[in-house]
Amino acid sequence: MRPGLARVLVGLYPRVWRERYGEEFEAVLEAEDGGWGTAVDVVWSAICEHVSPLGGFTMDGLSSRAFGSNSGSSFGGVVRQASAFLPLMMSLVALLAVLGHVAVYGAGGAVREADEGATAHIWQILIAGQVPVMAYFLFRWLRRAPRQTLGVFALQAGAALANVAAVFFLGLG
């Protein structure tokens, strides 16, 4: 990677992180032949570091978390995985679609049609689309951090059930 690009990417990290790891990380990036994929990974990592700093971890603790050791995995670390929060966001969007439909048309709906309507189709896609993502999440993380994974899975399942309950109790189903 070009030195200028490596310097810019390292500059995206918080000051405390750069003081501790910046020089070494910049050297690693310069030695790497990485392309856009590496740059995107570094940008994502910098964003995550701003949102949830790792704090007093050593590089050993960081590498054990990255490679899935149970000792370094936390609930926050597991829930930040895309396969963990994507079903939660899908449930939130589905619930907002249902509540938006109720706000516009009322709990009974406008007029019963042969076709369920766009809102119902969007809701069905969002709820059904969670199943493979949740299965992947369980497959990927259950052996690495079982307690944290089951906690996140309970949140995912609860969010999906909240959607089903809202549709049922509002008489939309």
Image (cartoon, grey):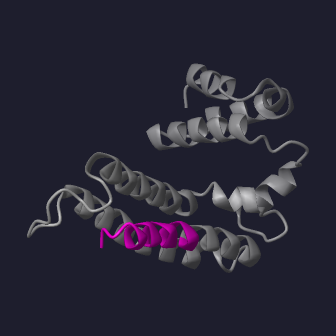
For this orientation, the residue located farthest to the top is 4
Numbered-mark total: 0
Q: Position of residue 28 (x, y in %)?
A: 69, 38
Quadrant of the rendered structure where residue 94 is?
Answer: bottom left
Is residue 161 at all visible to an observer of this figure? yes
Residue 159 is inside the magenta segment: yes
Say which quadrant the N terminus sits in. Answer: top right
Q: Position of residue 170 (x, y in %)?
A: 38, 66
User: Is 11 in front, or is 55?
Assistant: 55
Q: Which residues are magenta?
A: 157-173
Kindly identify the residue that appears in the image at 73 percent across and 73 percent down.
145
Q: Position of residue 53 (x, y in %)?
A: 78, 40
Quadrant of the rendered structure where residue 158 is?
Answer: bottom right
User: Is 21 in front, or is 138?
Assistant: 138
Q: Main secondary structure of the magenta part?
A: helix
Quadrant of the rendered structure where residue 171 is?
Answer: bottom left
Kindly identify the residue that appears in the image at 39 percent across and 73 percent down.
168
User: Is 107 in front, or is 66?
Assistant: 107
Q: Is residue 6 left or right of residue 125?
A: right
User: Is 145 in front, or is 128?
Assistant: 128
Q: Is residue 110 left or right of residue 15?
A: left
Work out whether 93 lies above or below 38.
below
Q: Position of residue 118 (x, y in %)?
A: 19, 56
Say which quadrant the C terminus sits in. Answer: bottom left
Residue 93 is inside the magenta segment: no
